[in-house]
Image: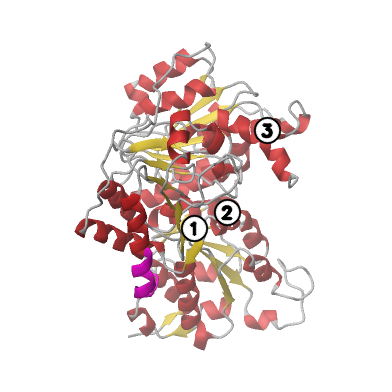
């Protein structure tokens, strides 16, 4: 087998586990590396900036299982850090490949561009170390392939971003491709069988004795790959099940045993009562952050909770070092062989009260998100932005087979537009692809990453984009500075953006201020199934927001101070 260059080896490894598209911005320290993208079986998707590239790789990874971006040393890589930090805290595996100056140049006495002027080349990897589960700069071609494999192995084990620095000369060094014959291990090691057996028996015992068990599906279910196990557990137990904001899109919300969303104090009353009075709560992948818990207003019994996590399971206050994926699989098998004696009763709550008539002619949050329930269709792919869009779409009742994600913990505004690019490209690479891509964002967020629109159109993506124009940062207004000028933003003509970002692409935009106008538009067949990009600018009151955001605004200031 003929030798290949290190760069091609890395790209072939990426292709091995499903990555087909690389995101990034070309820079002089990586240009030689990029010449080998096609040799590695990949295609290049150039980004308008590195931040959008990082968000795109994140969105891509949430569909394909992993994503990758290439940046240049210094300004390029540091511009991507915000996007990679979000991927780190939300367990999204992304490979950050950075083109470095050659080894001879690094060892020289001259000050090179993109450095900090001190002839040191380790400043930036030290920054990335804090938001990577593993990192390396390849300084020796003889160990390059084993180091690449080590780093990629760590990414799949921890389900978090990794950093690989490639000096120009190392990237072009010839190495044997023989290691490619051994696949990267993506599955976690098996559990200790005795501990696993004990844990499963205890969970089964609690379930069998329970009078009103429930299942809460949280962000860890999607991020750690147990969605299929959760679906089987729901079917076999027939327990009422619920989602948090991070768990939205992980289950079939039209399942007869789906009970709705849980977000602490702002939760629908009958849903809240059902969960908080349960004697056995199976909480899959809990992530107890402020935004995901209604500002810590969830009141679930700790003693009654069984918390399933990637590397452990908590039963009450006892922690067991077992991976939840294998525990769930064994629990399902146990119940199949020995059905629970629990009698299935009528659902104690309903997920949705039904669409209420608009209280005014204006578009309000109370009406808007309920109205989305009938607009959404099976097969839709929904991406929502941090803030009112994120909170609002959590209130919609999704049809079967609607997929959705958002960035709940890191909460970086602007994320959704870049992530929509990556997820749309990834979705086209899987079978079957999504039916419609729906991006719901806000005016303030969009101003950070609007350049992503050019990538959507360049790649032939035909989204329906809803932009909430409420003249600034509504969430911040409610936290502090209700009428402060710093919560205002520059005035844009959002309806003109698609044409500006893609003058040679057919598109259509709408500006809507009244609920009746929007209701009519959402029923229009031509709008609902257009073959070209569309944008709907929604004019809304700057002080209106979903109830959960009102709760957040009232509590966030206190929590931000540590009270």
Disc on the earlier residue, 2 or 3 = 2
> Start and end of the magenta stretch?
187-199
* Whole-percent x, y for residue 389 in the image: 53, 34
Residue at the (53%, 58%) spot, across then down: 24
- Tell me the SS state at disc 2: helix
Disc on the earlier residue, 1 or 2 = 2
Q: Which residue is mark 2?
A: 86
Q: Which residue is mark 1?
A: 92
| Residue located farthest toward the bottom when viewing the structure as drawn | 142
- Tell me the SS state at disc 3: helix
Q: CA distance from mark 2 to mark 3?
A: 25 Å
Residue at the (38%, 31%) spot, across then down: 349
The disc at residue 554 is 3
Asked whether disc 1 touches disc 2, contact meaning CB atoms under 8 Å apart, the reply is: yes
* Whole-percent x, y for residue 492 in the image: 63, 29
- Tell me the SS state at disc 1: loop
Q: Quadrant of the C terminus?
A: top right
Q: Is residue 49 visible?
A: no
Residue at the (36%, 49%) spot, across then down: 427
């Amino acid at each position: 087998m003929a030798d290949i260059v290190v760069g091609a080896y890395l790209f072939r490894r990426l292709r091995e586990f499903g990555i087909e598209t690389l995101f990034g911005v070309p820079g002089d320290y990586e240009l030689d590396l990029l010449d080998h993208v096609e040799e590695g079986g990949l295609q290049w998707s150039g980004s308008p900036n590195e931040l959008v590239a990082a968000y795109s790789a994140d969105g891509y990874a949430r569909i394909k299982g992993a994503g990758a971006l290439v940046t240049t040393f210094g300004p390029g890589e540091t511009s991507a850090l915000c996007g990679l930090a979000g991927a780190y805290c939300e367990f999204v595996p992304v490979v950050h490949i950075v083109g470095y100056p050659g080894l001879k140049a690094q060892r020289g006495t001259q000050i090179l561009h993109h450095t900090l002027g001190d002839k040191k080349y380790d400043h930036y990897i030290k920054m990335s170390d804090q938001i990577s589960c593993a990192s390396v700069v390849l300084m020796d071609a003889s160990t390059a392939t084993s180091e690449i494999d080590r780093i990629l192995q760590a990414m799949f084990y921890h389900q978090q971003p990794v950093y690989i620095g490639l000096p120009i000369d190392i990237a072009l060094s010839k190495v044997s491709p023989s290691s490619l014959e051994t696949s990267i291990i993506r599955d976690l090691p098996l559990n200790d069988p005795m501990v696993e057996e004990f844990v499963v028996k205890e969970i089964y015992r609690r379930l069998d004795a329970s009078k009103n068990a429930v299942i809460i599906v949280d962000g860890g279910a999607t991020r750690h790959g147990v969605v299929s196990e959760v679906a089987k557990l729901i079917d076999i137990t027939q327990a009422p099940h619920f989602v948090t904001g991070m768990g939205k899109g992980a289950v079939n919300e039209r399942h007869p045993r789906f009970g709705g969303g849980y977000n602490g104090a702002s939760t629908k009353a009958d849903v809240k009562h059902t969960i908080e009075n349960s004697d056995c709560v199976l909480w899959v992948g809990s992530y107890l952050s402020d935004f995901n818990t209604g500002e810590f207003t969830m009141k679930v019994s700790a003693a009654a909770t069984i918390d399933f996590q990637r590397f452990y399971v908590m039963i009450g206050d006892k922690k067991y070092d077992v991976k939840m994926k294998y525990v769930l699989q064994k629990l399902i098998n146990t119940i199949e062989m020995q059905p629970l004696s629990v009698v299935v009763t009528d659902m104690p709550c309903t997920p949705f009260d039904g669409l209420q008539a608009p209280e005014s002619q204006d578009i309000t949050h109370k009406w808007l998100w309920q109205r989305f329930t009938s607009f959404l269709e099976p097969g839709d792919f929904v991406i929502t932005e941090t803030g009112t869009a994120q909170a609002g779409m959590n209130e919609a009742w999704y049809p079967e087979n609607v997929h959705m994600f958002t960035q709940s913990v890191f909460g970086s505004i602007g994320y959704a537009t870049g992530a929509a690019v990556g997820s749309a490209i990834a979705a086209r690479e899987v079978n079957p692809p999504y039916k419609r891509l729906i991006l719901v964002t806000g005016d303030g967020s969009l101003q950070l990453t609007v350049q992503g629109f050019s990538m959507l159109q360049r790649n032939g993506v035909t989204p329906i984009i809803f932009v909430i124009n409420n003249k600034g940062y509504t969430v911040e207004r409610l936290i502090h500075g209700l009428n402060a000028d710093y919560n205002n933003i520059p005035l844009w003509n959002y309806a003109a953006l698609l044409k500006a970002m893609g003058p040679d692409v057919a598109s259509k935009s709408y500006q809507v201020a009244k609920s009746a106008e929007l209701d009519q538009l959402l029923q229009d067949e031509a709008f609902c199934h257009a073959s070209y990009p569309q944008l709907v600018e929604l004019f809304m009151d700057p002080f209106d927001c979903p109830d959960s955001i009102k709760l957040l605004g009232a509590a966030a200031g206190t929590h931000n101070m540590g009270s």
